[in-house]
Image (cartoon, rainbow, N blue to C red):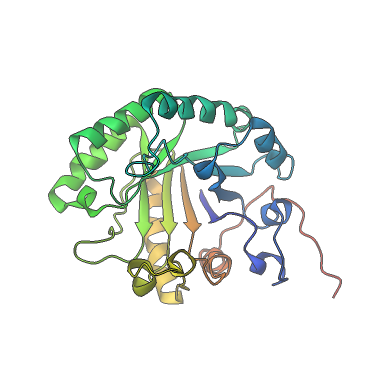
Amino acid sequence: MITIGLTTWKEHPALINDEQRDVTLTEYAAVLPTVEVDTPFYGIPRATTVTKWQQMVPANFQFILKANKVMTKHDYGSDEVDEDARKQAFVDYKEMIKPLVRKRQLKTILFQFPPFFRRSAENLQWLFEIRDMMGNLPIAVEFRNPSWYEETLIPDLMDYLTRLHMTHVIVDEPHRLNDGVPLVADATTPELALLRLHGRNEKGWFDQGKDWRGKRTLYRYSEAELKQFAAVINQLTPKVKEVCIIFNNNSNRDAAPNALELQRMMGISWDGLGLQQLSLF
């Protein structure tokens, strides 16, 4: 199975005939079968909020939720929390996702680590502790430091993630010799292969000016580039139950058009989507 989704649901006018307004979750779920939500990264919502999301989507719609920032140690070097608070975040997070687990609407929890999270014995141990604290919940990990992808060490890393039953996130992003990470199309869990596509805007990605966050994913993939992704997807499909592609190249609202183009290119369709609102004009 191949699924396609976007980061957040509001900022994708291509899904609603280019109307310039926020897209509702119900409208989004009428077009695509999964969404990545970053809200829990900033603050862990109540389970009641998650239940409200569920009421807006069909029964087989699925969510990818980002882990909270203290779970991925984004707080290091700034407003660092103590270890009791860090462990409590895991407890609160598991409580928050219970409605999704009950309805089988949690695709995975995305642990996107900060660029300073290097490959080290301490951080390898943290991955083990994450698995221990999260039990058998589905976990996907995205590394943003190139030390994880030293060529001779990649097989060991993939073996470690396999033993921890963590999905390796396959990333497309700008990268230089000593910065950014390469696209390594390795699957580490039989249930899921996850691709996150950030675009290839090298200047916007690496030149961190005052509007960096607004420009770093300013990129629209070409037809030729989407065909490259299609080849990777076809390579992965026999190895896993599901290949999920998340487009995050949305600084100029390009994620949804690219997602829909890839869907058409690969001839993908999904059953059980919500009802689309019909235009009267």
Q: Looking at the image, which is closer to me, 200 or 95?
A: 95
The residue that appears at 22% across and 33% down in the rendered structure is: 122
Residue 237 picture location, percent across and down: 42, 50
130 is higher (above) or lower (below) than 152? above
Q: Looking at the image, which is closer to me, 223 or 180?
A: 180
**From the image, which quarter does the C terminus lie in?**
bottom right
Residue 279 picture location, percent across and down: 82, 69
The residue that appears at 13% across and 49% down in the rendered structure is: 152
Q: Is residue 126 visible?
A: yes
Residue 161 picture location, percent across and down: 30, 37
Q: Residue furthest left?
A: 152
208 is higher (above) or lower (below) than 130? below
Relative horizontal placement of residue 204, taking residue 102 as reference (left or right): left
Relative horizontal placement of residue 249, taking residue 169 as reference (left or right): right
Quadrant hosting residue 56: top right
Quadrant hosting residue 187: top left
Q: How many marks?
A: 0
The residue that appears at 54% across and 72% down in the rendered structure is: 252
Q: Looking at the image, which is closer to me, 119 or 156?
A: 119
Residue 167 picture location, percent across and down: 38, 41
Relative horizontal placement of residue 267, taking residue 130 as reference (left or right): right
Quadrant hosting residue 133: top left
Q: Is residue 65 visible?
A: no
